[in-house]
Amino acid sequence: MVKNMGQDLLNEALVVIKNAENSGKMECITPASELIKNVLLVMQKNGYIGNFELVDDKKSGKFRVELIMKLNNCGAISPRFSIGLKEMEKQETVYLPAKDFGILIFSTSKGVMDQKEAKSKKIGGKLISFAY
């Protein structure tokens, strides 16, 4: 069976993680890219996933992600809008279910980070995903 690969690998990876978590699986295999690695690092730092590793499939690679049953929902945000510091709280109310519950993940000039780190560094960026 040939799987039709979508254009948004980050979205595909997050859907795989969310579906595996909802199914009670302990790990899953996602597509790999530098952006996905950076998003997974932010999710790991915030306690939503366990360890992950790159698996060489002789192509672009895959990530094996350890699931720890702490994730309710996650997803990629498309189109990816630039968000300034003043707009972050509004976006939190749009994508997160409650104040201080979950994270927004931004791609900034200083790397990929959650909204708390972006606020502390006083920088905005492109809103790329959320997790809670």
Image (tube, helix red, strand yellow):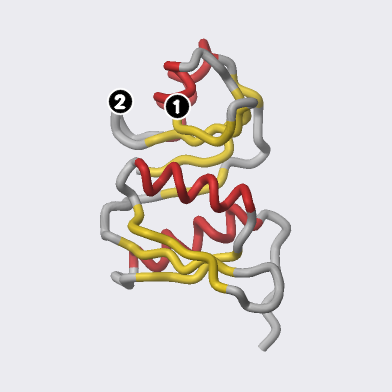
Specify the amino acid type for callout 1.
Gln
Checking the image for residue 115, the label placed there is 1
On the image, the x and y values in percent for residue 108 come to 61, 28
On the image, the x and y values in percent for residue 9 come to 64, 57
Determine the CA span between mark 1 and mark 2: 12 Å
Residue, x 46% and y 68% (percent of image)?
A: 64
Residue, x 60% and y 61% (percent of image)?
A: 32
On the image, the x and y values in percent for residue 59 come to 71, 74
Residue placed under numbered mark 2 in the picture: 99
Residue 88 versus residue 39: which sits nearer the camera?
39
Q: Upstream in the sequence, badge 1 or badge 2?
A: 2
Specify the amino acid type for callout 2.
Lys
- Which corner quadrant holds the C terminus? top left
Residue, x 58% and y 33% (percent of image)?
A: 111
On the image, the x and y values in percent for residue 66 come to 36, 65
Residue 98 versus residue 119: which sits nearer the camera?
119
Q: Residue furthest bottom?
A: 1
Up/down of 79 relative to 61, above or below: above
Helix, strand or loop at label 1? It is: helix
> Tag 1: Cα neighbours inside 10 Å, few (<14), some, or many (≥20)?
many
Nearer to us: label 1 or label 2? 1
The image quarter containing residue 131 is top left
Q: Is residue 105 left or right of residue 84?
A: left
User: Are circles 1 and 2 on residues that touch, CB within 8 Å?
Assistant: no
